[in-house]
Image: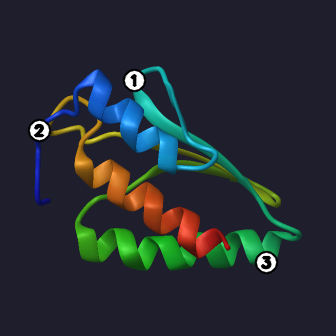
């Protein structure tokens, strides 16, 4: 991981302005993705898993049929860091 500094409230607000669909819930970055089918949702999970593994930064997520609920937090830092923002951006790109 590149940076373990927890983002300030203002830094997080700025980042959220560019992260369509993301919010902060229970101290974590949160987003829900919905796809036309289970296969497309699972393909998204696989694509994100490959990126997350290269980053060494893994999401908390739940998949029910075509819906995926994602929470991002940097546990080692005890909050949301730039690593979470980078992974959220990549997830939005992959969901396109």
The 10 Å Cα crowd at callout 1, few under 14, some 14 to 19, many 20 or more, is few
Q: Residue at x 29, y 36 (%)?
A: 80
From the viewer's perspective, is residue 26 above or below residue 58? above
Tell me if I can see residue 38 in this picture. yes
From the viewer's perspective, is residue 71 above or below residue 46? above
Label 2 to label 1, Cα distance in Å? Answer: 15 Å
Where is mark 3, residue-wise? 39
Residue placed most toward the observer, 7 or 74 = 7
From the viewer's perspective, is residue 89 above or below residue 24? below
Where is mark 2, residue-wise? 5
Where is mark 1, residue-wise? 27
In screen coordinates, is 27 left or right of 93?
Answer: left
Badge 2 or badge 1: first in the primary sequence: 2
List x then y, in percent, for residue 83: 26, 54
In screen coordinates, is 39 left or right of 6?
Answer: right
* Disc 2, SS: loop
List x then y, in percent, for residue 84: 33, 49
* Disc 1, SS: loop
**Number of the front mark, 2 or 3:** 2
């Amino acid at each position: 991981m590149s940076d373990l500094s927890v983002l300030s409230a203002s830094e997080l607000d700025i980042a959220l302005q560019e992260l369509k669909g993301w919010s902060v819930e229970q101290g974590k970055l949160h987003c829900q993705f919905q796809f036309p089918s289970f296969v497309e949702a699972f393909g998204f999970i696989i694509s994100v898993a490959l990126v997350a593994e290269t980053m060494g930064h893994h999401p908390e997520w739940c998949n029910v049929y075509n819906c995926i609920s994602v929470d991002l937090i940097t546990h080692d830092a005890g909050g949301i860091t730039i690593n979470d923002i980078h992974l959220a951006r990549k997830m939005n790109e992959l969901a396109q």
